Amino acid sequence: MLIDRAGLPFIGIALALAAGAGWGFGRAWAIPFLVLAAFFLFFFRDPDRHVPTGPNLVVSPADARIMVAGAPAGPGAPPGAWQTISMFLSPMDVHVNRLPVEGRVTRVEYHPGSFLPAYRKEAGELNEWTEVWIDRPGGPVVLRQIVGILARRIVCRVAPGDVAVRGQRFGVMKFGSRIDLFLPLSARVLVRAGDKVVGGETTIATLEP
């Protein structure tokens, strides 16, 4: 299993602290830092995924639990008419994010903000986020990476002009966080609130061609 490179500094520091504590105070003092390093290895794990094939599919951008499925977009949504799929990532979930659709990245925007718990409704509007617009036939799809009370750093590795490949890794959010996905009104949402989804594998919606 791969480890996302965003986790390497965390793992390295924890191991260095373990080595220093073990050398200076005895092996028992190294154990807490080894446990911390093991947690970082777990958190930044990046398993391979089997991306479904077929036209006009939307796959989940993350391992998460669905909070909102198909509701009209509320305050703070991107300009336009959308329906929303909102999902919460716990600290135990894989936090590597994947692109939900094929197309071309046309816009990447960063918005500074607060660090409210990601599960709160207003977090999608008030918290810090990065937004990725993917243009495709039939209209764009917009993905918003939202920080939470623990996740205070978003890594986004796509830029305007990049070709989007469904299921492609494109970023990571460090610790508990949330993703909001904005879909055209014509999209057919296939998940419900409470469903557990797998990033890059679970088909959460279909789009008009």
Image: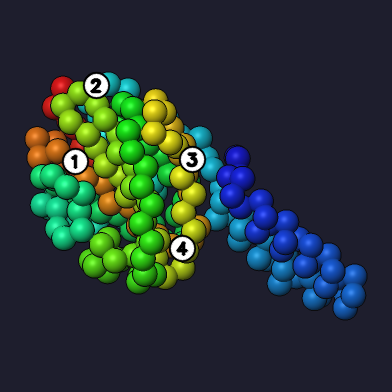
Q: CA distance from mark 4 to mark 1?
A: 25 Å
Relative image position of residue 136 (x, y in whole percent): 24, 26
Relative image position of residue 189 (x, y in whole percent): 16, 41
Pick the residue in front: 136 or 40.
136
Q: Secondary structure at mark 2?
A: loop
Q: CA distance from mark 1 to mark 2?
A: 16 Å
Left or right of residue 123, residue 84 in this image:
left
* Residue assigned mark 3: 157
Q: Secondary structure at mark 3?
A: loop
* Residue assigned mark 1: 183
Question: Closer to the observer: label 1 or label 3?
Answer: 3
Residue density around tag 1, few if under 14, some if 14–19, many if 20 or more, within 10 Å: many
Label 4 or label 1, whichever comes before in sequence order = 4
**Residue at image point 61% right, 45% down:** 5
**Residue at image point 28% right, 51% down:** 180
Left or right of residue 155, residue 68 in this image:
left
What mark, if any, has residue 55 been given in the picture?
2
Q: Is residue 190 visible?
A: no
- Disc 2 residue type? Pro
Is 102 drawn above or below residue 176 in the view shown? above
- Disc 3 residue type? Arg
Pick the residue in front: 184 or 20.
184
Q: Quadrant of residue 115?
A: bottom left
- Quadrant where the N terminus is found in the figure: top right
Is 63 drawn above or below residue 104 in the view shown? below
